[in-house]
């Protein structure tokens, strides 16, 4: 008997890493902007959230280029119609210090979202995506963690970020960031991508 697998409703999480971007210089730029501007309140509990126009700021062109180049792979692998294109639709920085975190949220109004880690010291908080399937409501998380060796079978998926790491994921996918317990600053650039 030959079994055929049908992978239904897959949820994509793409990961890349840059070794060419000067994260220290970008981090210093963000910390300078933080001194001049008050925070925007979004998912951040504590911490600082910048304005959303960083994608057009030349000081962040290395990041926008890195995101754009990597998203080309996502775009092509999803077989979008040839007449469609994508664009960055908002990009911002978040600075989290001790005990700061980001509560569960989605990025409404977009198709894809990304998080690029400028500075992510050990213990500064993992990013966590919630399983979007209703199955997670049917069995308690403790059962899943105890009985399945595949982390993708759990009701949430954790990734520990590091400097230069990029994650791209569907904008509708619930996610949050654990508290920063590192004693150091954690800096991420996030944004949205629209297909049209």
Image (spheres, rainbow, N blue to C red):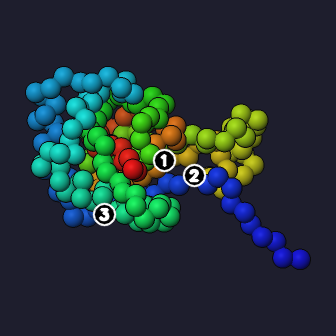
Tag of residue 170: 1
Question: Which residue occupies 36% across, 44% down?
Answer: 192
Q: Earlier in the sequence, mark 1 or mark 3?
A: 3
Q: Is residue 26 visible?
A: no
Q: Is residue 73 above or below residue 145?
A: below
- Is 55 left, or right, of 141 in this rendering? left
State how far apart marks 1 and 3 are (Cα): 17 Å
The crowd level at tag 2 (other Cα within 10 Å; few <14, some 14-19, many 20+) is few
Question: Under tag 3, what secondary structure?
Answer: helix
Q: Which residue is mark 3?
A: 69
Asked where in the image residue 124 lies, by quadrant, the reply is top left
**Residue 17 location in percent, x, y?**
34, 61
Disc 2 vs disc 1: Cβ atoms closer than 8 Å? Answer: yes
Mark sitting earlier along the chain (2/1): 2
Residue 37 is left or right of residue 170, and the answer is left
Per the rendering, the mark at residue 11 is 2
Residue 31, placed above or below residue 62: above
Q: Position of residue 50 (x, y in %)?
A: 23, 32
Of labels 2 and 3, earlier in sequence is 2
The image quadrant where one finds the N terminus is bottom right
Q: Report x, y in % for residue 76.
A: 44, 66
**Any part of residue 4 in sight:** yes
Q: Name the one closer to the observer, 82 or 135.
A: 82
Q: Residue at x 70, y 38 (%)?
A: 134
Element class at badge 2: loop
**Which type of secondary structure does the marked residue at label 1 adopt?**
strand
Residue at 37% from the left image edge and 63% from the top image edge: 72
Residue at the far right in the pictured view: 1
Return the residue nearer the eye: 78 or 67: 78
Describe residue 28's horizontal placement relative to residue 194 as left or right. Answer: left
Residue 166 at what x, y percent from top left?
A: 36, 54
Determine whether 96 is above or below 4 in the image: above
């Amino acid at each position: 008997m030959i079994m055929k697998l049908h992978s239904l409703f897959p949820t994509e999480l793409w990961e890349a890493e840059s070794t060419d971007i000067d994260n220290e210089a970008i981090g210093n730029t963000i910390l300078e902007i933080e001194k001049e501007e008050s925070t925007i309140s979004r998912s951040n509990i504590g911490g600082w959230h910048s304005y959303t126009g960083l994608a057009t700021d030349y000081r962040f062109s290395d990041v926008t280029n890195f995101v754009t180049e990597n998203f080309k792979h996502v775009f092509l692998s999803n077989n979008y119609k040839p007449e469609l294109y994508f664009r960055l639709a908002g990009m911002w920085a978040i600075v989290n210090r001790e005990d700061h975190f980001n509560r569960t949220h989605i990025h409404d109004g977009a198709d894809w979202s990304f998080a690029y880690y400028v500075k992510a010291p050990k213990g500064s908080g993992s990013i966590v995506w919630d399983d979007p399937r209703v199955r997670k409501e049917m069995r308690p998380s403790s059962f899943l963690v105890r009985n399945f060796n595949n982390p993708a079978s759990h009701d949430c998926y954790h990734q520990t970020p590091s400097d230069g790491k990029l994650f791209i994921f569907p904008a509708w996918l619930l996610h949050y960031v654990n508290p920063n317990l590192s004693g150091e600053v954690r800096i991420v650039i996030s944004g949205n991508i629209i297909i049209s």
